[in-house]
Image (tube, helix red, strand yellow):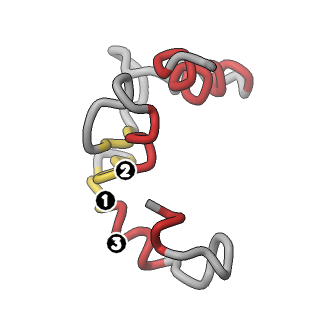
Amino acid sequence: GIPAAEAIKIGSLNGAQAMGIDADYGSLTAGKIADAYIIRGNPLEDIRRTRDGKYVTRAGKLYDTRQLLDSVKGKLGPRDASEKDLW
């Protein structure tokens, strides 16, 4: 029952505030560290879009989420998860 915009805020800005790092993280704001998770589609229309990651940026470098997941397959996460569970 939580609106999509509020759920995104809870997982980003509120999470950063809870950890005391919101001066640098938690929102896309001038002066903050610009790590980002880039998804396909509009999560405000369908919150499940947040599971459809395309890229992640970290320290100015762009990473493909599929390649990242493939690189840790069998090393991280549930051992019996099907691919559809991850996407």
Foreground: disc 2 or disc 3:
2
Q: 10 Å neighbourhood of mark 3: few (<14), some, or many (≥20)?
A: few
Residue 49 lies, in percent from the top left, at 38, 41
Q: Badge 3 is on which residue?
A: 67
Residue 4 lies, in percent from the top left, at 48, 22
Left or right of 20: which side holds 9?
left
Lower position in the chain sequence, tag 2 or tag 3: 2
Give the amino acid type for the residue marked by disc 2 in the picture.
Asp
Which residue is at a point 67% across and 19% down the rendered structure image? Answer: 17
Which residue is at a point 65% across and 27% down the rendered structure image? Answer: 15
Give the amino acid type for the residue marked by disc 3 in the picture.
Gln
Q: 10 Å neighbourhood of mark 2: few (<14), some, or many (≥20)?
A: some
Q: Badge 1 is on which residue?
A: 63
Give the amino acid type for the residue marked by disc 1 in the picture.
Tyr
The disc placed on residue 52 is 2
Determine whether label 1 and label 3 are within 8 Å by CB. yes
